[in-house]
Image: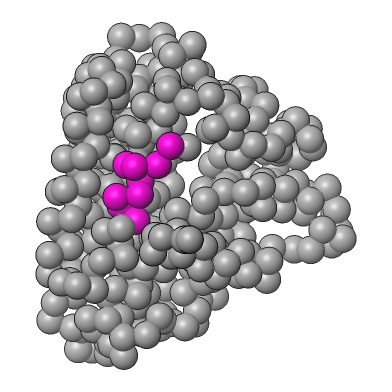
Amino acid sequence: MDTPVQSLLASGARLTDAALERLLPAPDTLPHSIHRAMRHSTFAGGKRLRPILCIEAARMVAAQAGPGELPEGIAALAAALEMLHTYSLIHDDLPALDNDDLRRGQPTCHVLFGEATAILAGDALQTLAFHSIANLPCPPHTIVAILREVSSAVATGIGRFGDLDTGLPPGMIGGQVVDIESEGAAPTAALVETIHRAKTGALIATSIVSGGLYALGLATNPGAPHPDSEMWVDGLRSFGENAGLAFQIVDDILDLTQSSAELGKTAGKDAATVKATWPAVFGIEQSRRDAAQLIADAFAALAPFGPAAGPLKSLAQYLVDRTH
């Protein structure tokens, strides 16, 4: 029998996949190669965690600020976030970066379609994601706020953590650059936190915040925003930052403790390439304790939402309890 969180994951994945099917060009659309490459990586079996977090954040905020129903059109935003995530995976797997042949249990994009097409497929998914956000059925001021939020999350900033502070919001590309440039160097706590919060945590946090912004945009008048809007967005951001870091810490642990078959990607790559990981600095047991504390802190950030936060909390707990 499915648990509540399994049902939540399944329903969110169905919503997201239906929107992806609608938004992505069909495989027989010219030029065939690029569209088939985009679809291969998008529909290769991902868990859809980022879009599901977006959907549940929107549902929670709607329960507080509006009619209490899932905001119409949220699946398109969720799908756009999955496109951005998939684009990052395609590029991350390239020979010039992680040089991986396996992703989500399937051959990586460049293995099947060639390196040039894989690069372009990632570029196309990123472009289509922003196009999809620009066409969301919500007020223009909300679209601008979401575009600002999402573009920061995929940009070059590395955030405000450690000696590498740029003064910019943490961004996925910035985290990837620091990760590449630090390969082979002795990892420090500040370096690992900087990479994790930017490379992985930023897109997870922005998925949650953008879902809340979307729900607020449909539920409130731009001339008279809800009095609790700022507090709610701050809570969502704190929840997302803590849950995002916990997610990556668990990923680091699983890379050391699970097989390639269990992970759906090549296991042991972090240790083999001397990457900056949480267990490399703190050990596996302390890493598990740190992930648990981060989830507790994430839960605390959702206190203003009361019982409506239950689904998001169950998803956060899933992030640290998962085995793949």
- Measured as percent of width and height from the top left, residue 25 is found at 75, 63
- Measured as percent of width and height from the top left, residue 2 is found at 47, 61
- Measured as percent of width and height from the top left, residue 262 is found at 54, 32
Residue shown at the point (72%, 48%) measured from the top left: 40
Say left or right for 121 vs 4.
right
The reply to whether the magenta stretch includes residue 317 is: yes
- Measured as percent of width and height from the top left, residue 67 is found at 31, 90
Above or below, 309 against 193 in this view is below
Above or below, 40 against 8 in this view is above
Which of the two residues, 213 or 140, is positioned nearer the viewer here? 213
In the rendered image, which quarter is residue 212 located in? Answer: bottom left
Residue shown at the point (23%, 54%) measured from the top left: 239
Residue shown at the point (34%, 42%) measured from the top left: 321
Q: Residue furthest front?
A: 1
In the rendered image, which quarter is residue 29 located in? Answer: bottom right
In the rendered image, which quarter is residue 117 located in? Answer: top right
Is residue 52 visible in the rendered image? The answer is: no
Say left or right for 104 vs 172.
right
Above or below, 195 against 57 in this view is above
Give the magenta range: 315-323
Which of the two residues, 228 or 290, is positioned nearer the viewer here? 290
The reply to whether the magenta stretch includes residue 173 is: no
Q: Main secondary structure of the magenta part?
A: helix
Is residue 109 visible in the rendered image? The answer is: yes
Say left or right for 310 vs 176.
left
